[in-house]
Amino acid sequence: MTATWTPRVIAAAVIALGLAAAVQHATGGHSIWLAFFAVLATVLMWATRVVPEYLAAFVFFVVCVVGLVAPAPVVLSGFTGPAAWLVFSGSVIGASLGHTGLADRLGAKLAAVANGSFPAVITRVAVFGTGLAFLMPSGMGRIFLLAPLLAAFAQRAGLAKGSRGRAGVMLAGLYGTFFPAMGILPANVPNNVLAGLLETTGLGVPTFSEYLLLHFPVVGLAKLLLLIGVLVVMFRDVGPVPAPQADPPPAMSTGEKRLTVLLAATIGLWLTDSLHGVSATWVGMAAALVCLWPGTGLLPPNPMKSVAFEPIIYVAGVVGLGVLRAAATNRRDTPSA
């Protein structure tokens, strides 16, 4: 047996044992131990990647539902929460950016100001990613938006696929929008969870400015400077990035104009969510609905083929696993009658 097939065989054995345990429990086993097995096996599959993350999530769903570990609404609760739908809306908007050509246009504009020495390029791209965290409250949504934009920028700047320069640009933009966002209260899901816990415990939720002044100087700005320094050292052998071609871009297409208006409206609603009360999740879903609507020209005729569903399944699995673990812990700690 080759080494390539060994992890897959191990994964198949784990799945088979899980299903066997599920069937045994369904006929009179112990749900707490099956819940422990399901959580442990899923985490191990995610950590080792012997199978794709979305497939490990499907294994978790099937084992838990077949084994009656918890009701299906509990196991599948990730699909009813905001995280999976933020990922879905971000994926749809990202696909629209690529289809309409707006990502390439924005990448060209970014390339026009980010040419020069590679440390300067990394700095400008990372600062751009951090600035975007003030506009979009979803880290996954920002990554879905930035990925095609950075790819278009790298192509315009002459950084070939697989090159170190292209890798440095992608890391600067994606890490720049992900890690410093911890210092901005509504910029990612963990911060919003923290705010919810502070509210439920009666400690009170800090205002945006209070949280920013307390955390952003170290968690945000210092982390951004550290990130730039590490990337500059790692990619110190990459030469300067030449100025992009000076050819004027073509006029904006109808699809680009529509998407620009939609993005402006979406970001505006994200910034003013404290006024209108609509969460970022459903603002993003409304934008995704517009992108998916037939005849808008924002996506190809079969739009769902352009949407990446694997991250959505993975996020739903992570949320469902957390809810199941909490439910199992509560059930264990509750004294029996």
Image: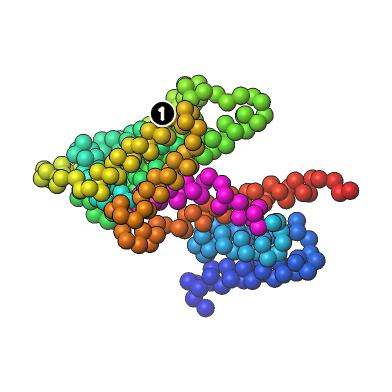
Q: Is residue 167 visible?
A: no
The one nearer the camera, 62 or 275, is 275
In this rendering, would 52 be left or right of 156?
A: right
Q: By what rule are the colours in the image chosen?
A: rainbow
Crowding around mark 1 (Cα neighbors within 10 Å: few <14, some 14 to 19, many 20+) is some
For residue 182: magenta? no
Find residue 145 and report its horizontal and vertical position in percent: 36, 45
300 shown above or below 87:
below
Q: Main secondary structure of the magenta part?
A: helix
Which residue occupies 57% across, 55% down?
317
119 shown above or below 83:
above
Which residue occupies 65% across, 57% down?
72
Which residue occupies 20% across, 48% down?
253
In this rendering, would 103 be left or right of 134?
A: left
- The quarter holding residue 110 reads top left
For residue 75: magenta? yes
Q: Which residues are magenta?
A: 72-95
The one nearer the camera, 127 or 311, is 311
Residue at numbered disc 1: 221
The one nearer the camera, 295 or 307, is 295
The furthest residue to the bottom: 1
Which residue occupies 37% across, 53% down?
292
The amino acid type of the residue labelled 1 equals Leu
In this rendering, would 220 be left or right of 116?
A: right
Find residue 91 and report its horizontal and vertical position in percent: 40, 51
The furthest residue to the right: 337
27 shown above or below 324:
below
Find residue 99 and report its horizontal and vertical position in percent: 28, 54
